[in-house]
Amino acid sequence: MNWKRATITAGFLVPVIGLLAFGLTRDPKEIDSPLPGKPAPGFALPVFSPGEGKLALAVGDTVRLAEHKGGVVVLNFWASWCLQCRDEHVELSKTARAFYDRGVRFYGVLYNDQESYGLKWIEEMGGQAYPSLLDPRTRTAIDYGLYGVPETFLVTPDGRVAYKHIGPISERLLSQKLDSLLRAGTP
Amino acid sequence: MTRLLGSGSLVVALGVAIYAALALLAGARRKRTDLLRSGELALYAVWGLVTTATLSMVYALVSHDFSVKYVAMVGSRATPLFYTVISLWGALEGSILFWIFVLTSLSALVTYQNRDRQGTLVPYAGGVLMMISIFFLIMLVGPANPFGLVSPTPADGPGPNPLLQNHILMGVHPPLLYLGYVGMSVPFAFGIGAVLSGEIENDGWIRLTRKWSLVAWMFLSAAIIAGMWWSYEVLGWGGYWAWDPVENASFIPWLTATAFLHSVMVQERRGLLKLWNLNLIVATFALTILGTFLTRSGVLSSVHAFSEGPIGRYFLGFITIVLISSFALVAGNSERLRPTGNLDAAVSRESVFLLNNLFLTAFTITVLVGTLFPLVAEAIRGVKVSVGEPFFNRMTLPICTALLFLMGVGPALPWRAASGDVVKRQLLPPTVVAVIALVVSLVIGVRSPYALAAFSFGAFALAANAREFIDGAAARRRAHGESPPVALARLVGGNRRRYGGYIAHLGVLTVTLGIGASSTFRAEREATLKKGETMAIGPFTVRLDDVYRRDEPQRMVLAAGVTILKGGREVGRMEPRMNFYPTQDQPVPTPSVRTRPAGDLYINLQAFAQDGSNATLRVIQEPLVPWIWAGGMIVVLGALVSLGAGLKERLPARAAVRAPAAPRPATAALEEAAR
């Protein structure tokens, strides 16, 4: 074994590995959504899961985005077949309770799923603090340009999309975004 | 239960694989037969355990056990059984499980086949294969565990990605690709084993390595063609190759493996290129791992990109170890790989092989650079760029043309040195054919210089390769009075390796002709038709009859009924569709393809009116596309014929019984002369 040659060869390979390591830090799919800053698409969707306590609405009520002028709305698209939705479930309910008195309203929107599966899921996951809505023919999901579930949208009091989050969101990040949105008007 | 059996098998397999690797490597080093024997048994045990885990996953998928994480990710009660079973390789975790299943199966097969072989080459190779297995098992036990628990159990799952449950080739392309890709681990293991065992200094190891390279190359060739066919049939744009990173990832190791299959002959015949060949083997394996890393870790974006996880970091660690240890090992031992022969003349078969390797290497580097360039650009200048078809086409077409030319020259030239007379006699007929092809191409309206070059050099190579068969068979007819089919069969059977190679050349030429014709003479029209309206393309008239909806358990299908007319007569009906899957808002296009030897008629449903009154159709006339698929099959046939040679060498007794007409001296002399 000629160690000198072996070392020189290994040295030539280091930049290649460095390049690959750099690649890992990048996300080629990270393309800015054109939605933030734009008016949030309106919707009028029926409640199928009421929510809990003072956050609750009656099943069958229609929730309209237009009636929320003046308050912040958090819209979370989810499904019973979505595994990542389980990760954020508890944190979303916690945040919804914490921000209710500051005028923030949370709504779940069931995406491409059956109502009965959705209800069973909520029960098995230990409840959902805020109401969830049905989205017949996924019209609203299409309006919001949904890429997959879960996705979470923050809508400002004047009806613009302030922030869009792809994938499960944490209580910490969501609280931070809501805090600055309520205080400074930007997330 | 299934979950515990699956994940338990994988954990135990990891432990046993570590033992197998240590026992085989240590046993080979210390020449301890007891260690070698127990390492060998451990290797078989790893295969058994991994097989158990794989079958557990298949069972979990089929029984819709949504408490198993992978099933909850890709399963759905509405998915048909066939697509449920093959969703084993439809997402990241399952595909890694399938990978290790193929890898350990090949390891067990190779070890078993060579169990009586003297020396330590096979144990070392087994140890290397087990080291690779350890890496994949670590991923399966850790970040890519498909058997994780999902609780509470979901009622149903989202089903596989719609694109992966829309065509039967999903059941064909991925397994072929894995056999090809993972198969390259075997020659790599033999190469490293040869260095470690010292067998590198005699050439015995090269036969095993060549055979397994050919096996993996055959599967990889078939996989690439099947992948082209699949994307042609499901993506709706009428093309079959787009230089997408994942396509390139399969093609780059194919190029280096092709180079090896040629240059290894120079080593066997003339004792040259030993170091180069070992480097090609190592590079081929490294490129399969690199390709997997690039497409599985989210480094490059592609239509194939799997969902990412933390596996990128594991892969990076593995690549670092593979690249540095294997290339350093080869470089450190390079003095033992001195050539034992000389290059005698500039015009000879070996010099054609040298040029062939030069161009294949240039091809490899071009595609690799084009694939990695977006990463380099972002690292250096912080900008996102994409490298598209124009770059690849412009850069690689001249290389392809040169390779076509060499494909014709190589078989015509003798080893060692060719006299001017021989060159003239051998190359004159193919040159005449090439000129005729050039003239014909010009007459039928080809103007692009590359298409002209491709057609005439292709014809040149075709004539040169076909001539080997025609002249050889004619010589046998004269010598033995055999009928043409018998003469041809005996000719091929008498030297399978050589004629298998020429058959593969004919296959590649068929593919080239298909690609050349379909990209040069492609005609395309798009129009919105009301019911009963027609559009014309080439000799065909396309009439929209109906737009209708059909509900299937796992999807909703929207289809256009189309009648094809030729000269006013109805010649066929087609049904381009859009399939809507419940968990995806985007419809999956499902073009309809009418295949005839002369070419395809390809119709894609682009859009439709909600009330079904009209539909927008994209109609493409694609000459000779089926020749690409047929050519792929010819390549595989060539590889199979060539592999038969190895079989015959191992079974001399039976082969002799089967082929009673042992070559008489006259034939042997003739064949020598034709060489």
Image (spheres, rainbow, N blue to C red):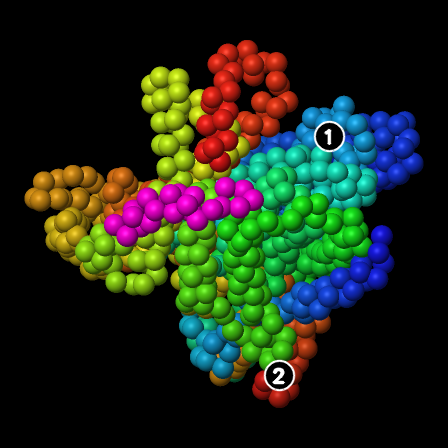
Chain identity of mark 2: A
Relative side of B193 to B287, left or right: right
Query: Residue drawn at (71%, 59%), measured in percent from left and top?
Result: B316
| Residue at the disc numbered 2 | A182
> Quick check: marks 1 and 2 in contact, CB under 8 Å?
no
The answer to which image quadrant residue B486 occupies is top left
Query: Residue drawn at (49%, 46%), measured in percent from left and top?
Result: B418
Instruction: Label 1: state its secondary structure.
Output: helix
Residue B154 higher or lower than B54, as above or below: below
Magenta residues? B414-437
Identify the amino acid type marked 1. Thr
| Residue at the disc numbered 1 | B111
Identify the amino acid type marked 2. Leu
Magenta span: chief secondary structure: helix
Q: Residues within 10 Å of mark 2 (few under 14, many from 20)?
A: some
Who is closer to the viewer here, B110 or A35? B110
